[in-house]
Image (spheres, helix red, strand yellow):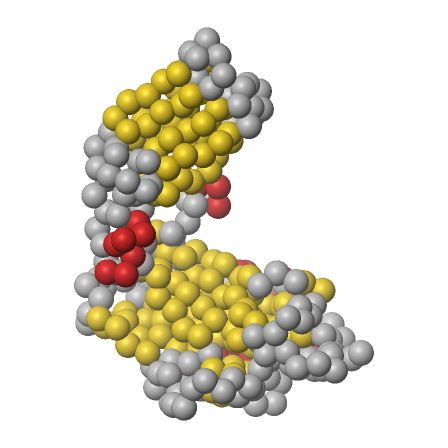
Amino acid sequence: MKRMTAIACLLSAACLAVDPSLLMRTHTDPSRMFMVPNVRSVDVMTGFLGGGEEGFTAVAWIRFYPTNGIVTNVPNSFWSIEPARATREGGAELPAIMDYQTVTDNSGGTFADPHYDYRVDTLEDTWQYGCYCVNIETPVDVTVTIAGAERFVAGSNGVKQAFNILGTAADYSWSVTGPTGGATPVKFGFAVNPLVKFYGIICQSSAQDFYTDEVPGGPAVPAITNEWTMVAVQARIDNGTMQGRMAFFTWASEIFPSAWQTETVDVSHFEKNARVQLSLAFFSAIDLPRDFYGMKVFPYCLTDDELRNVRDLDMFEMRRRGYTRWKGN
């Protein structure tokens, strides 16, 4: 009995001695993450929700390489409530308008108007005839026409090609035409892409001179420089209202907006495969390389203190690895 008690005490002591950064969930544990150096992509991170969340928090660290020129870069974000994950990204397959099947290079037919639900009036003129996802495998060059829009497809035997066509007319018909006039078999099928509304926030850089008042949800902050900066984007749905904001942290400072951006919604939670994306916009011809670290999405809206804790845990891990606060020349 004494030996078992002693072992239990030792185990308890060992648990208490575990570094707190290792107690985080696997997908948000900074010790499992790696810096992505010398990046030139404007896309910082993309994540997808599991469904049923009433809020989320997306976090990423960004640091530019030093320069003698002026570079104005503006972190911006967008997200959806509805599914917005492509099939090739792991999302669901689209219901087919026409099942993938063998036709010829002289085929055609009609289909029903997809009847998009216009949730944003300004998109009606652009998307009113539908946007279609096409799958095709053809050994000869062909022209695909759907809803008045044409697309040339180069022959590539044994290779399935996939692309989108944005309809241009209320002509709900399709055709595949090629040089042999029907003598060549072609595998072909298509579906309609859903029209998804996106919400978002863009920060206001102090280097910008086209604003006078802070936009709710997006604080006025200095452009990200060669100092590590943690960008945190948050959104939450409560009682028919969605609130969103963007906050910034360095190793020594923090900036929150004075208010949340709000919008009325008719849902109570985010759906499975709702999209969350953080990217960069530039007001300069200079495209500097940058470093990314610690990209993660929490399935709820963190409190301010929890955000500070994420910053501290990430900073602890970055220092442990020998990362410096500032990027040298």
Q: Quadrant of residue 70?
A: bottom right
Q: Is residue 245 left or right of residue 70?
A: left
Observer able to see residue 317 = no
Q: Give the image location of residue 267, x and y in percent.
A: 22, 62
Q: Compare residues 59 and 53 and report the one nearer the observer.
A: 59
> In percent of the image, x 55 and y 18: which residue is there?
139
Q: Compare residues 115 and 141 and report the one nearer the observer.
A: 141
Judge whether 274 appears above or below 65 on screen: above
Q: Give the image location of residue 122, x and y in percent.
A: 28, 61
Q: Is residue 6 left or right of residue 28?
A: right
> In percent of the image, x 41 and y 90: which residue is there?
212
Which residue occupies the extreme top position in the image?
A: 183
Q: Give the image location of residue 248, x and y in percent.
A: 51, 82
Q: Quadrant of residue 258?
A: bottom left
If the image is split into quadrants, where does the N terminus sit? bottom right
Q: Quadrant of residue 107?
A: top left
Judge whether 18 appears above or below 91 on screen: below
Judge whether 27 appears above or below 63 on screen: above
Q: Give the image location of residue 145, x and y in percent.
A: 38, 31
> In percent of the image, x 45 and y 34: which residue is there?
151
Observer able to see residue 284 = yes
Q: Is residue 44 left or right of residue 321?
A: left
